[in-house]
């Protein structure tokens, strides 16, 4: 593999839904006498930035600069997330506080490297704080090489259509990690990165590669996208553009945990494009990064050194 570009000057503006990923690690040695459920004896806890915050963390791990715009609640989880991001070199987090919401938290109980249970806490942010975030977006846009919109469906990207319009008018590439079945709101973006199940939810099923290509190209054209990248788990990832289709096979390795793999993929794409790389080269490296991160437990990052080691 050729040497990687210099990522140190790459600047990515990340906007989206942030969350706090909490892990309770322990052992299960008995079943509860109160109900037929395992009893987890917790021996260790850990907290990590999740959602769009994990995207920003992945950008920084590659040696690039990430500015993160999002919303948290006025609560312990929001302060914890802010502190975690403040301690992350390469991430400038601008977190608007909405006292009317609870910070999104995903709590995972883990025993012997296997998730037993996940509990989610979440509330959609209010209109006023989202307007303030849009003002911040306008102010930070000129400094960015690439805009990355990380949609986890938590309500933090209500103004995503306006953000795409502003960024494209300023000549900035816009990458979107989509959610839900309303892709019309992503119209005009440069690149969308749905996974296989997300794409099926929007386009319907397919019988063969020709059918997949037809559905993907139709969606790409209807939304005015330059490219559509469908990540397909063990089948790798496929890039659809007007010029044709290219495919990257999955990297052969043991899959340990797919949590946050999409964050790593789109973060790597953004850093490569912000560094001046071509789309094909960006997809190849993102595929390698995704192959590395699924070998790690929970929301994790891939470093430049790990990619160079590949």
Image (cartoon, rainbow, N blue to C red):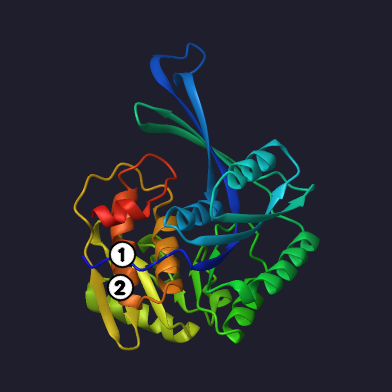
**Which residue is situated farthest in the bottom direction here?**
243
The residue under the point 29% across, 78% down is 213
Q: Could you tell me if the residues under marks 2 and 1 are in contact, i.e. CB atoms within 8 Å?
A: yes
Q: Position of residue 2 (x, y in %)?
A: 23, 68
Quarter of the image where the N terminus is located: bottom left
The residue under the point 58% across, 58% down is 153
Secondary structure of the residue carrying numbered label 2? helix
Q: Quadrant of residue 216?
A: bottom left
Q: Position of residue 181 (x, y in %)?
A: 51, 67
258 vs 14, nearest the viewer: 14
Quarter of the image where the C terminus is located: bottom left
Figure check: 149 above or below 263: below
Give the residue at mark 1: 285
1 vs 266, nearest the viewer: 1
Q: Is residue 233 visible?
A: no
**Which residue is situated farthest in the left direction here?**
252
Q: Tell me: 179 left or right of 162.
A: left
**Which residue is situated farthest in the top direction here?**
33
Q: Position of residue 45 (x, y in %)?
A: 51, 27
Tell me the crowding category of disc 1: few under 14, some 14 to 19, or many 20 or more residues within 10 angstroms, Cα based. many
Q: How many marks?
A: 2
The residue under the point 25% across, 77% down is 246
Figure check: 45 above or below 124: above
Which of the numbered marks, if any, corresponds to residue 23?
Answer: none
Q: Quadrant of residue 263?
A: bottom left
Give the residue at mark 2: 281
Figure check: 158 above or below 254: below
Q: Quadrant of residue 70?
A: bottom right
Tell me the crowding category of disc 2: few under 14, some 14 to 19, or many 20 or more residues within 10 angstroms, Cα based. few
**Mark 2 and mark 1: span between their CA atoms?**
6 Å
Secondary structure of the residue carrying numbered label 1? helix
The residue under the point 35% across, 78% down is 278
């Amino acid at each position: 593999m050729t040497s990687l570009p210099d990522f140190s000057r790459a600047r990515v503006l990340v906007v989206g839904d942030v969350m706090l990923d909490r892990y309770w690690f322990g052992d299960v040695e008995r079943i509860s006498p109160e109900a037929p459920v395992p009893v987890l004896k917790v021996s260790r806890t850990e907290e990590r930035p999740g959602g769009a915050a994990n995207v920003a963390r992945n950008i920084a791990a590659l040696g690039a600069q990430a500015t993160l715009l999002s919303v948290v609640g006025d609560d312990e989880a929001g302060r914890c997330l802010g502190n975690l991001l403040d301690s992350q070199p390469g991430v400038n987090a601008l977190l608007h506080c909405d006292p009317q919401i609870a910070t999104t938290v995903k709590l995972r109980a883990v025993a012997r490297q296997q998730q037993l249970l996940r509990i989610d806490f979440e509330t959609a942010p209010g209109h006023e704080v989202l307007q303030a975030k849009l003002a911040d977006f306008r102010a930070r846009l000129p400094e960015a090489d690439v805009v990355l919109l990380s949609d986890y469906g938590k309500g933090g990207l209500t103004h995503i259509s306006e953000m795409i319009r502003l960024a494209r008018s300023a000549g900035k590439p816009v990458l979107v990690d989509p959610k839900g079945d309303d892709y019309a709101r992503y119209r005009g973006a440069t690149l969308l990165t749905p996974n296989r199940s997300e794409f099926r939810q929007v386009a319907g099923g397919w019988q063969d590669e020709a059918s997949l290509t037809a559905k993907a190209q139709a969606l790409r054209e209807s939304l005015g996208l330059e490219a559509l990248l469908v990540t397909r788990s063990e089948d790798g990832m496929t890039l659809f553009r007007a010029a044709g289709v290219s495919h990257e096979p999955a990297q052969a390795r043991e899959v340990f945990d797919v949590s946050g793999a999409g964050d790593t993929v789109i973060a790597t794409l953004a850093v490569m494009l912000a560094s001046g790389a071509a789309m094909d080269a960006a997809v190849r490296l993102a595929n390698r990064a995704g192959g590395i991160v699924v070998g790690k437990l929970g929301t994790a990052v891939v470093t430049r050194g790990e990619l160079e080691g590949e």
